[in-house]
Structures are given as structure tokens and as C-alpha cells.
Amino acid sequence: MTSETPDIIPFVSPIKAEILTQAELEMVKGKTLDLLNQVGVCFPSSKALDVLAEHGAQVDRANEIARFPPELVIKAMSTAPRSFILGGREERFDLVLDGQSSYISTDGTGVNVIDLDTREKRPSRKDDIALMARVCDALPLVSFFWPMVSSREYGRTAPLHNCHAGLINTLKHVRGGTTVHPRLAPYIVEMASVVAGNSAERIRRPPICANICTISPLSHDKHGIESALVYAEAGIPTSFMAMPTMGSTAPATPLAALIMGDAEVISAMVLVQLAFPGTPVFHAVFTSLMDPRTGGYISEVPTPSYIMAKQLAHAWDVPCLGGARVSGDAPELGWQSGYEVGLGSGMIAMAGGDICGLLGLVGSAMTLYPEEVILDHDGIFHVYEMMNNKGLDEIDLALDVIREVGPRNHFLAQKHTREHIRNLRLPSLLRHRGPDGQQRDPREIALEKTKQIAATHHPPPLSSDVLAELDRILERAESEAERIFGD
């Protein structure tokens, strides 16, 4: 038995915060160009260095460093598209990255789960991804599914199983490509082709995108950058994500860390544009902070660096993954996680990132409480309604009712009240009372709702032929992994 997946709701806000002026953005871009030209970036891949050298980068093969003349960067970035589509399984779930809307994403990729039934903390499994894909399929503000945890039972092929679990359990766009051994990346491309129907449709409306993280400071991962070239050749949109940590892997000032992360991201974009001009890419820099007391990781920095990163992406004329995040550093659900959700929800309204939000995890994106997605979605919905609840077309009708009721009366008996009060969305997790009349804990209600969705929401499955073909692809990928790693 299948369920209807509600239409997605893009987050459109009349507020757009601009921290950096146009002149300041041009200055920051200039500093990025200086870093790329004078310092360079490490590419520990002869394949990548060959592409860069062929197109005019200065390549030091002994140290695996590439330096980029500014004119090469500008020319390569001019071929990157400003707008493209991230496809859903149905066209009504397509996401158009043109800067007009923000699409809320889940966060990834954690490694621990608080079990939905036992409530014990355990290593994550593929079934957890399938569960969360179905839960997020039922939530209209979640437009983009990033597998929230990892299929840890599958070891080195976990990224392929993460992609598979997403593709078969939601109609929404799936972040399916990540860093894998480059000989495994073609199997992810093949899965995308099978779900799309063919390679041409995969390029027109790609059902997955990829994400490749840089290594701060100023370096790339060999398998990551070579996987990116596989994805780019297939036309799969790829975000490059820098995560500089101030004080350890980045300078201890936000703008300097942002510029360094920008150099890492732009160097990867230049590579794929030189190899495959016009391949869709998007930009992501998440600056964090080393806790000076413990050496620990703090994801939420006390500056508007996420908004500045979004501005910088758009200054390079590419879409942005970022601008705001809801997942945070709280070790478990409680006051801190609620604070981070509230702050992050407000940031979504101000930032205007193309893909943003990154909801559903705690502990610096390491741990999944399944009900957290419901709590986060509810918090974001409050902010969405605050930004979009105008109702200007109802004013004249309501004024007629006011005239009829007049002073010192009430509106309980009015037809207008009976008709319109049903349209007012009551907070789904707040002000609920139990049989004893006491207000219930919103987390308890969220857990019930999660279990209800898990039991009842089943989006239409892929055809049996497609499911069987996906299984065969995974079997071949597992065999290839055995040849590569000898496990």
C-alpha cells in the first residue's frame, strides 16, 4: 500500500541579509585568486594534475601542487552554469537552483543512531537511511534528501548503499554521490541512470547529486577529486564543500578562513570545468571553530560566516549549498538543540542559500535521533509561516465582518470564523494536552509522529525491473570492491 507524497514547499523569504558589499565581495574574490596563484592547492592525483597542466596551470608534480593564473580561473568559472535542475523521481519534486527559492535539506552523514524503539545509541545501518528517507518524504518543507547516516555494515561500499536506500525510499532529490574509490563511482552513476530511465534523462533531470569535501588547508583527497571527475563526466551536479576549522586547519579569523575555504572549492570547480566545461557545480563553505579549551569542534561560529559564504558563491555566479544550518553541536536533544534549531531556522529566512537548512542531526552531525527531523521541521515551519502569511486578499471580507459584529461583541457565531479558523495551522507539537489535562512534551509527540510515518507512509516504489537492476549494480560494485581492497 502506497502513500501520497505531499508537494514540496520551497522556502521563499522577503528578507535577504547582505553582510558584504559588492566591493568587499570583489576584494574577497581577489584574495582567493591571489591564494590560488601564489600558494596553490595540493592535488594528490596525477589525473587531475594532467588536466590542470594541459590547460595552463603551473604544476609542481614533485609536491603535487597546482597554481592557477587568475585568467585561467576566470575563464574556467565562466563555463559553470548559474542555474540547473536537481531532479526528483517525479517532475513536481524537481528543484530549480536559480536563486529564487531556498530548498531545505537534511544533514549528513552521521554514524550513530538513537534507536527508534529501544532508544539505545548504536552504529547506524542502511535501514536507518531507508526509514529517514520515508519520514522526510512525508514532510513538505524537506525538499532535498541527504542520507543522514551511513550504512556502516557495508564498510567501504557504504556510500553506494546510502545512495540506494535514498533512491528507493523517497520521490525527492537524493544526495547520492560522495567520495569513493574512483573505480566505484561509475556504479553510482549507473544507479542514477537506471532510476532516471537513461543517460540522457539523467543529464536533463539528474536524480542524484554528489558532494566532495576538500581537506583544509588547501588540499584535496585523491579518491574524492577523481570521483568528482567521474561524476562531472556523467553530468551529475557536484558540490565541493570546504570545512575549515579556525585555529587548527584554518586561520583563527572568520574572513581569512572563508577565503581559504573558497580557494579550495574554486580550485576543484576549475578542475572539473576544464575537464568537462558546463558541468553543474555548486559551492559550499562551512567555517567552524576549534574549542580553545578542549580542542573540540564547534560548528556554530559567532559570526555571519554562513551568509558571507552564500554571498561569495553567488559572486562566483554558481548556486550555493549553505547559508544556514539547523543541525548543531548539542550532544543530545534538549535546550541547546532547541536553541540551535531556532537560530538556524531564522538564518534560513535571512540567508537565501539555494540548498540550505541541513536539519536532523545533533552532536556536530554525528548522531541521529529520528524524531529530531519532526522537531526541526516544525521549527522551520513556524519561521516559514511568519515570512509568508500575508492574507491581503482577505482584508475587505474580514472588514465586512468587523462592521457587522461591531463594538463589545464576539466573532464566535460568524460564518467567516467557522470557515477561516480551520485554515489556521495550530502548532503541531505545542499546546497538546494528555487525558490528564497536562501539557505533553513536544518531543514525545514528535516520536509518536515519527513512528506513525514509519508505519504508514510508503511512497510509490520503483518498478520491479528497476529495483532488480539496482540490486545487480550493487552486487557488481561489491565484487569490484573485493578486487580493489581484497577484503
Image: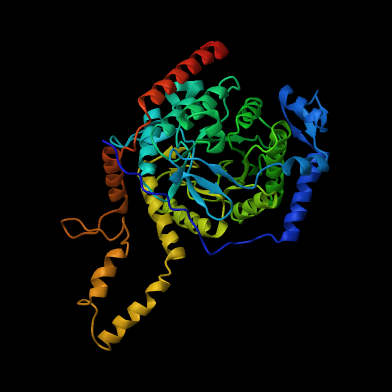
| Up-down relation of residue 125 to residue 340 (above or below) | above
- Residue at the (71%, 47%) spot, across then down: 259
Q: Write the residue at 56% across / 21% down.
A: 184
Q: Is 234 left, or right, of 192 in this rendering?
A: right
Q: Position of residue 276 (x, y in %)?
A: 69, 32
| Left or right relative to 364: residue 181 | right
- The reply to whether residue 437 is visible in this rendering is yes
Residue lying furthest left in this view? 435
Is the N terminus in the top left, top right, bottom left or bottom right quadrant? top left
Which residue is at a point 68% across and 49% down the rendered structure image? 317
Q: Name the foreground residue: 268 vs 476.
A: 476
The quadrant where residue 483 appears: top right
Horizontal side, residue 292 vs residue 49: left or right: left
Q: What percent of the width, then of the height, locates residue 347?
A: 53, 57
Is residue 416 placed above or below 436 in the rendered structure? Answer: below
Query: Would residue 292 be visible to someone looking at this image?
Result: no
How many badges with numbers are in the image? 0
In this rendering, would 323 be left or right of 250?
left
- In the figure, 416 relative to 68: above or below? below
Task: Give the image location of residue 473, x and y in percent.
Answer: 47, 20
Closest to the observer, 245 or 128: 128
Residue 142 at x, y percent in the picture: 43, 47
Give the colour scheme shown: rainbow
Can you tell which quarter of the image residue 118 is in? top left
